[in-house]
Amino acid sequence: MSIRESYLESGPGSKLASWIFSTDHKRIGLLYLAVIMSLFFVGVTLGFLMRLELITRGPTIMEAQTYNSLFTLHGVIMLFIFIIPVTTSVFGNFMLPIMIGARDVAFPRLNLLSWWIFVAGTILAITTLILGPADTGWTFYAPYSLISGQYVALAVFAVFVLGLSSILTGINMVTTVHRLRAPGMTWHRLPLFVWAIYATAWILVIATPILGVNLLMIIAERFFGIGVFDPAKGGDPILYQHLFWIYSHPAVYVMILPSLGVIAEIIPVFSRKTVFGYKAIAYSSIGIAALGSLVWGHHMFVSGYSYTAGVIFSLFTFLVAIPSAVKVYNFVGTMYKGSIVVDTPFYFVLAFIYMFAVGGLTGVILGALSINIHLHDTYFVVAHFHYIKFGAAALGFFAALHYWFPKVFGRMYNRRFANWSLLIFFIGFNLLFLPMFVLGYEGMPRRYFDYLPQYANLQYLSIFGSWVLVIGIAMMFGNLIKGLFRGKPAPQNPWGAATLEWQVPSPPPKENFREIPEVKHNPYHFENVRRELD
Amino acid sequence: MSYGIEHTAHKDYTGAKIGMWLFLFTEFFLFFGPVLLYTIYRFRYHAAFTASSHELDLAIGSINTAILLTSSLTMAVSISALQRDRTKLSLWMLAATFVLGVVFLINKYFEWTEKFSHGMYPGGEALAGGPPGQGVFYGLYFFLTGLHGLHVLAGITAIGVLAFMVLKKKVSAADHVRLENAGLYWHLVDVVWIYLFPIFYLVR
Amino acid sequence: MYENGEKHYIARYTTLVMVWVSLIGLTWLTVKISGIGFGTFSIIAPFLIASIKAFLVVDYFMHLKYERPFFKWILLVVLGTVIILAWLVYEDVAYRPL
Ligand code: HEM
């Protein structure tokens, strides 16, 4: 095979411009990676500082007002800039076209535009950090968000802009999957990651505009006082909560579905066996997307909305556990009787399944009306959503990073070191968030910069956990960055996978495929592929 | 300046249309949010909403509706004409659409200023003493018609750009999907108004 | 120019003009009957007429009638979503003790 130019090579001319104006889906994926990871580290720092504040009672390193701003900013960065876009924008962009045998996404220039809009939104969010960050929590609940003296409108506008970027990405992904599949790539031969991104893209298209207009109304309220949410003017703040969660609960599935897709890619490769229940996994993605759109009310059990609504939403919440559980069973079923090769990405999968189970099951507990009244707005909730969003969704992204790293950069990281960093990450994470379940059950409320003496011991444990966790994260990314510059060149198909991205050189050439391949098998047909790593 | 790979000269007509329709649906959901609020408040503040809608000028509202409907017709004719390679007719129809869009906005401007001069805007003195429902009605009225007005503005900008492209033969009978997509957008703006009209003017 | 020579539907001018005439006619009708005050129906009627008008615009001006089924399916999905979302919100406001 003759050597073709990889996408990482630039021609003559400005190097920076050849990246930031590139319409190549692979480069755009990496652009997203660069921006998002920088902001992720900012978010981690904020979380770390919040934990540190609680090391003694009363103000330690910050006042109550600062703490309020920190958790708002931490939430906005971690959700809207990190976890909602990350897997879709980075690996959806980079891998999805290759996986379906296309040369690019359907609208390459639109793709670049979404990145620029995303950057604009990020800059706006950082601007509020300097001017005076909002203190409303990432939910911007009315009526407080209408009267807070901080720069709420700017923060809200930042989220609106980020949402616009999501919408454009979603439109692009849906169209790509419909129009650009290679010959023979039927719907039932799509890799499961593609199914997951496809379902995610639909949620982005349908739900994001509702959040967008809701945020616009908050801005209009603050500047002109249109009164639709302000109880003093006859508005109804609970309706804000409805419109907010109509988007923001499905957004949780925007975070977790791509990660579930990643896991569904990795497991068969390392079990060397076709995936168990392909259709069940594929359709449960759609099922989660659809049912997940009908459960938003479980965030509002104590808002004072009607009892009837509470019962209905509680019921739907239980139902959505079914497709999620289908996925976990299928994952485990795939491993059963496989010839398992244990390697770094597989360890990530194991950690993921544990985290997803803890997060999911505590979610069912919270979905029960009566228990929710006791646990609402306590640390139990904080622990629950960190397990899902951080322990599962973000860990799934880290798994994707370790799985596709050799393909993306053409180099290999130190796998043994990666395993150790995962272990430390895992221990730190559980030390940090497991105690929060107990704290919450005992009544520790969320969003407080202070606590009663009886909570001290568990708080210490949790704070200690945050230190271990940060060390784990530093090790993990230090290792990857070292691999980026000094790693050994990676073979074309290190893990022995059968999907299309492993049939092109690492790193992939500019045009992905010399000729568009013709697909003859399902994506987990391992007969003719072999692992190239020792 | 393009730093991507050279794409082979193949245009995906259906793909472009799918993209546009998906975008239209996001616009639809954008308007759905406040309209949902409207339905709820309408029941809650029935009397105040009915009274307030009597204060709007039904004549201007009806004229504006007719204007937008007509502009939709000229837009559709323009597309048909371009597809038949009758560039001149197509351009005239685009010009007509553009002008009708501008007239719509001018009417809206007079309608708004008239309300402002009577202090009937959020925070204005005329609404301060009224029942709570009245304030909400005008809040929604200004928000929704304002949002719609912005869309009209975006639409006429797009039409202007496209007229230019047709003139320069960048959009032509052989490659007309961009004009069609602009048309889809313009018709959506029309559909939104078709619903805003009864919402604010007719249900009294 | 376009791949595999897809056929494009080209609308006839007369059809378009007839649609426009009906749209204007319906507008006239809905203005005429507004404020007559025949109970609930005076709330429903304007929206019914509006929906007919929207249907005309979408089907003829936007060519949905002549598109492939996929476009109609997504329209159905979107309308279904809207109805379900609205229904769930109404479950709250209709039964909430105010
Ligand atoms: C080192 C990592 C992290 C630490 C130490 C951390 C810690 C914290 C702490 C202490 C709070 C505030 C609890 C309270 O007082 O209410 C919080 C809130 C939150 N965290 Fe994290 N977190 C981390 C990572 C993440 C990640 C990765 C995500 C999302 C993907 C995330 C999402 C959130 C959200 C949404 C909130 C709620 C903000 C609000 O109340 O408005 N966190 N986190």
Image (tube, coloured by chain):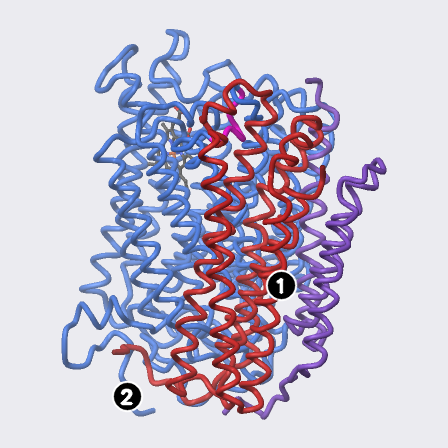
Chain colours: A blue, B red, C purple
User: In the drawing, what numbered circle is on residue B69?
Assistant: 1
Q: Can residue A421 be seen in this view?
A: yes
The three-letter amino acid code for the residue at tag 2 is Ile
Question: What chain is tagged by disc 2?
Answer: A
Q: Is residue B164 above or below residue A405?
A: below
Q: Do labels 1 and 2 share a chain?
A: no
Q: Is residue A400 left or right of residue A354?
A: left
Among the 4 quarters of the image, the one containing residue A449? top left
Front position among marks 1 and 2: 1
Among the 4 quarters of the image, the one containing residue B169? bottom left
User: In the drawing, what numbered circle is on residue A3?
Assistant: 2
Q: Where is residue C63 in the image (x, y as percent from the top left)?
A: 66, 74
Say few, some or many: other residues with alpha carbon within 10 Å of mark 1 (under 14 / 14 to 19 / 20 or more): many
Q: In this view, does A63 lie to the left or right of C51?
A: left
Q: Which residue lies furthest to the top in this view?
A: A453
B172 drawn magenta: no
Residue positioned 52% across, 72% down in the render: B181
The three-letter amino acid code for the residue at tag 1 is Leu
Residue positioned 69% across, 34% down in the render: A313
Q: What stretch is highlighted in magenta?
A: A226-231
Q: Quadrant of the C terminus of chain C?
A: top right
Query: In the image shown, does A392 or A532 lie closer to the viewer?
Result: A392
Task: Tell me how far mark 1 sits from mark 2, CA to CA.
Answer: 59 Å
A228 drawn magenta: yes
